[in-house]
Structure formats: C-alpha cells, structure tokens
Image (cartoon, rainbow, N blue to C red):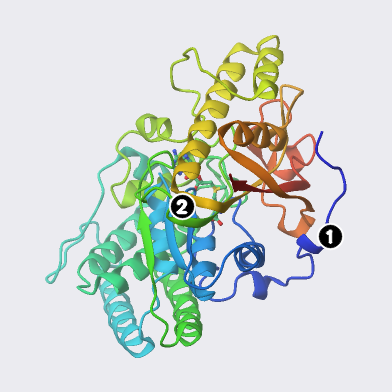
Amino acid sequence: MLSQEVDDSWSFKDATRTETSYLTHGYHRYPAKFIPQLAARVIRENTQAGDLVCDPFMGSGTTLVETIVNGRRAYGTDINPVAVLIARAKTTPIEPGKLKREVEAVLQYLKAAIVRQEGQALLTSETFDVHLPSHSRIDYWFPEKQKHDLALMLGRIMAVSDKDVQTFLLCSFSNILKGCSRWIMKSVKPTIDKHKIPAPAYQSFLLQTRRMVKKNEEFWRTIGSHKIDCIIDNRDARNLALENNSAQLVVTSPPYVTSYEYADLHQLTGLWLGYVDSLKEFRAKFIGSIQKEDGDLDLCSPLAKETVVELRTKDKREATGTERYFFEMQQCFEEMHRVLKKGGRAAIVIGDTDLKKVKIRNGEVFIETMEKIGFKKHQIIKRPIPSKILPLTRDEKTGKFARTANADRMAYPTEYIIIMEKI
Ligand SMILES: C[S@@+](CC[C@H](N)C(=O)[O-])C[C@H]1O[C@@H](n2cnc3c(N)ncnc32)[C@H](O)[C@@H]1O
C-alpha cells in the first residue's frame, strides 16, 4: 500500500486564479490541466538548465510552458490535434507590436463583415474563402447566426499569412466555440441545452483574443532574449520522436481509463478545423479506449491483473477496457524508459479511482509496472487537490467524468506524484 500521508506543500491551495493562469496558461480550457506551479516545482527539483524535459501526454502544454520559462528544452506530444494547437499557441511568444497590428486588422474586418452580412443567408467574401463546414454535427450544435459568423471568422483567420499569428487566432477561435454553441456550459459531456442562448461569436472572439494579446505580452517579456527550444508533436505517447537516453525528465499526467472522452470533448474544434471525420476512429486512438478489441495482454503488474480479475466479476466490458488501459500505459512507461537517460526521472501525476465499485489503484499499479520495466522509486508524494481546482469528478458507477452534483463522490480529492528514476 502507498503511504496515506498527505504532503500539503504540494497542494498549492493558496495559488490564486491569476497565478494559475499566468503567462499563457489561461489561453484555453482543458480538462485535468496541471497547475503550472506543480509542473515548475517538479522541473526545478529534478533538472538543470538546458536539460531536456518531455511530456508525452502534454494536453494543453502546461509542462512545456514551464519548461521553457525555466530555461530547459521541451518536447511534448499528444494524440489530440486540439491539444497540439493549444500547446503551439501557448509556447510561441509573438512580438507584441506585430501581434496587435495583425489582430486589429482581423477584428476590424470581422466587425464590418459581420454587420454587412447581417440577416443574409449566404456568406461571401471578396478577399478570402469562407469555410462553412458541411458536417451535420455543426448544424446540431450551432444556430445559423453563430455558424455563419464563425465561418466568416475562420475564413479570415486562415487568410493570415504569419503562421504563429494564425495559430494564436485559431486557439482563440477554438476556445469560444463551446460558448457559441448549444453545448451545456458546465458539462464536459456532449449534451445539448435547449434553453441556452449561445454567445454571439464576434463579441466572444473579441474578448478572448484581447485577453490573449495581454497574456502574450507578459509571456514575451518573461522570455526576453532567451532562445526557445520546444518541439511539439501529434504522435502517440508510445512512439516518441526522441533518441534513446536523451531526456532528463518526464513530467506528465496520463489519461484515465475513460480518456476517449477527450475526443468527445474537443469535437467542436475538431469539426470546425477538419480534425475529425469519424468520431469513432478518433476515439480509438486514445489510451484505454474500450472500442478496441480484447487480446491476451501481458500485464507485468500483479495488482493490475488482480484488479482486472475483480472487475470481470462485475462488468466484462469495463474489465476489458481497464486491462487494455493498464497494458497501454505499460507500453508508455517502456517508451519513457527508452528516452530517459540513466538516472533520469519520470514524474507521473495520477489519482486512484473507482469503477463499478472496484478500487482502481492506478498509483500502485504504475509503480509496480515501472519497477518491472527498470525504474526505482525516487519520491512518492500524495497531494491534496484543493476543491476549487478539482477539475472534474467521476461517477462511481461508470467511472466517467460527471458534474460534481451528479457524481457519487469526489473521484480523486488526493492524487500521487510518482517520481521514478531510471536505473
Ligand atoms: C490529463 S490530460 C493532460 C493534461 C495536461 N497535463 C495539461 O496540463 O493540459 C491527458 C492527455 O493524454 C492525451 N492522450 C490520450 N491518449 C494518448 C496517446 N495514445 N498518446 C498521446 N496522448 C494521449 C489526451 O489527449 C490528453 O490530452
């Protein structure tokens, strides 16, 4: 059993919202985001300036931003193209004067164009292509007005020639989609709210973009004349584009058993930017997706095997999904072991959870697995998650993300930071 002693110094409970969203960290919402202060502390305590830090499940890129700011080299990847877009925007400071000029040109154009098009059914533009997606899911989520304004906006953004500015604007565009749609704001599940009045697209974009412009300026000043060394990939965590023995540290929070929900969650951006044709295929790429076929999987952790056997008595499908999840995470740990230098460390942030009333002790399973692969324990921290930043809760019966009120209990009010060292 892992120690039950909680280390309060890792809770960062006094960090204000301004502090947790400093620099570019607040560019885009993302489920189960790291607190930047946590990533920063792990990086500072386990690396030196110039070392290579890797996050194979980078999500919105919190680790990468902190790696850069602390003068280390960064490599991050995520299977989700929406994560790649956000991480690129967050790790790319843009010269503030240039950004302001480009942004104002886009905003002014949109203001005039949207007023001009008011009430018209057909979208046209003399200067660029209008990207009106024909996907039926777009019609499902967006009222006509929002759909047209967003199409005009996307067309104008795609006409921006500077790729960094374009990525910045696409990140802003992506973050307003939920508010401009019929999606229930508080829900991470794709649920329509019949009574919602979707936010106006132009005003939302204006506010979001101006907020981001300010944050870029802060980031630009912080980076100063430092050279940024940051590579961002859209690869699977089991196939990192890194040499053997090249990284000093992995800092990551892996997905949970039901992580295919990331695909559902980002479908609005995926639909607009053409990342998703088939939601089913998209989901299958995520770790632990229960849509994959069962096989005879060789789990090296005895606890993982026991958990799967226990789950099988309750629900065969969930047992299969969990077995696959543990197996795929095992493959990820093997890949981390390959890319880390001897003496290099992997810091994994993970909580335990419940599935069909079976305790899924992810922390212990991961330690056991990593020990078999060639790691030894360096430091195991149990940290409280202050309720104000508890990202999501999981329903006890299904293990899926749920709104707090519907969840039977908090899924992971504490979590582990497992720091393992490559032998
Ligand atoms: C808990 S989130 C990481 C959040 C991140 N720490 C942050 O601060 O934003 C886990 C991530 O794993 C990604 N993921 C799931 N399966 C993956 C795979 N096979 N390869 C790479 N990334 C994957 C998901 O897309 C998700 O972004």
- Label 2, ligand 1: CB separation under 8 Å: no
Q: Residue furthest right?
A: 5
Vertical side of 230 occupied by 227: above or below: below
212 horizontally vs 394: left or right: left
Please tell me which residue lies in front, 217 or 378: 378
314 horizontally vs 297: left or right: right
Residue 197 drawn at (x, y percent): 52, 56
Q: Residue furthest left?
A: 126
Q: Is residue 142 visible?
A: no
Q: Which residue is mark 2?
A: 181
Q: Is residue 62 visible?
A: yes
Disc 2: CA contacts within 10 A as few (<14), some (14-19) or many (>=20):
many
Mark carried by residue 8: 1
CB within 8 Å, label 2 to label 1: no
Q: Quadrant of the C terminus?
A: top right
Residue 38 drawn at (x, y percent): 66, 62
Vertical side of 156 occupied by 345: above or below: above
What kind of residue is marked 2? Ser
Q: Quadrant of residue 351?
A: top right
Please tell me which residue lies in front, 191 or 389: 389
Residue 334 drawn at (x, y percent): 49, 36
What kind of residue is marked 1? Asp
C-alpha distance separating marks 2 and 1: 39 Å
Mark carried by residue 83: none
Label 2 vs 1, first from the N-terminus: 1
Residue 371 drawn at (x, y percent): 63, 35
139 horizontally vs 212: left or right: left
Q: Quadrant of residue 108?
A: bottom left
Q: Could you say whether the residue bearing mark 1 is in a helix, strand or loop?
A: helix
Q: Could you say whether the residue bearing mark 2 is in a helix, strand or loop?
A: loop
